[in-house]
Image (cartoon, rainbow, N blue to C red):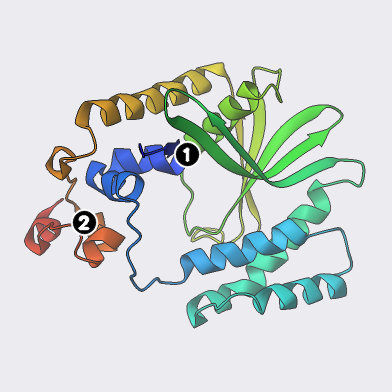
Amino acid sequence: MENIIKISPSSVQTLDKCPRAWFFRYIKKLYPDVEKDGAAEFGSFVHDIAENFKKCSISEYKELVKKSLAKFKLTDKYRAKVGHATKNLYIYCMKKFAETDIIEKERKIELPYKDKFFLTGKLDVLHVRDNIISIVDYKTSKSESDYSFQLSFYLHLLKLINYVKSDTLECEIVYLCNEDHDEELYVSKYTIDLKDVESAIARINALITTYKALGTDDINKWRKKIGKLCKYCDYYKSKNCDGKEDDIKDEN
């Protein structure tokens, strides 16, 4: 059976970072069994609280946090972050959302795109107030990054399913704990427009072109991008990728 390729924002970004890693993940469906630092589990914990959050008292919210903590195995490193991350989430949600708002949490969109390709994305919060649609995305990363591509991808999806008629979309990236604003709520605002969407579409189509050009049989066609970040790659740590330690150390 021919491989079905799902294209998400992270899929496109993985190809940009390293074609070989994309080959392992999206063609070979390889999921290495390597020790994690706990970041993914912490992210799942935070998103579980966000998904189940309703306006409530602090005592009720603490019970929600307690129940969620029981579902996840957090390392000591990330348990230390629970307090201010959950506090910031509570502050943000209580201020941001009104009882009359339409709030869709963990909204998943998946639809056929071209040939055997599918576009897919999961929106943390799809927020509607007075017929104005916006997106909220929660981050537990340590530093602020540019998320305009991810948000442009989401607007493209929303327009494809005719959910959004406007040519612009207001979005907020909510940093619940990061390096520069560790103890306070920090929100980065984006306005995504059609130029951003066109740029996202170009990157999606470039991925499809690359896939069709390189095929699925010869791993050597999917080149490695060897650099300092390789040591964090699951495929390098699991020895699926034969990048060399000296190459990684010497890369500037």
Q: Which residue is mark 2?
A: 228
Q: Is residue 85 left or right of residue 250?
A: right
Q: Looking at the rendering, in which quadrant would you find the N terminus?
A: top left
Residue at the (36%, 74%) spot, across then down = 35
Element assignment for label 1: loop
Q: Is residue 178 left or right of residue 27?
A: right
**Residue 153 visible:** yes
Q: Which residue is mark 1?
A: 8
**Residue 183 visible:** no
Element assignment for label 2: helix
Q: Nearer the viewer, residue 197 or 223?
A: 223
Q: Is residue 7 left or right of residue 233?
A: right
Q: Position of residue 207 (x, y in %)?
A: 34, 30
Residue at the (58%, 21%) spot, across then down = 193
Q: Position of residue 221 (x, y in %)?
A: 15, 37
Vertical position of residue 74 compared to residue 138: above or below: below
Residue 61: quadrant of the picture = bottom right
Categorize mark 1 by other alpha carbons within 10 Å: few (<14), some (14-19), many (20+). some
Vertical position of residue 179 compared to residue 62: above or below: above
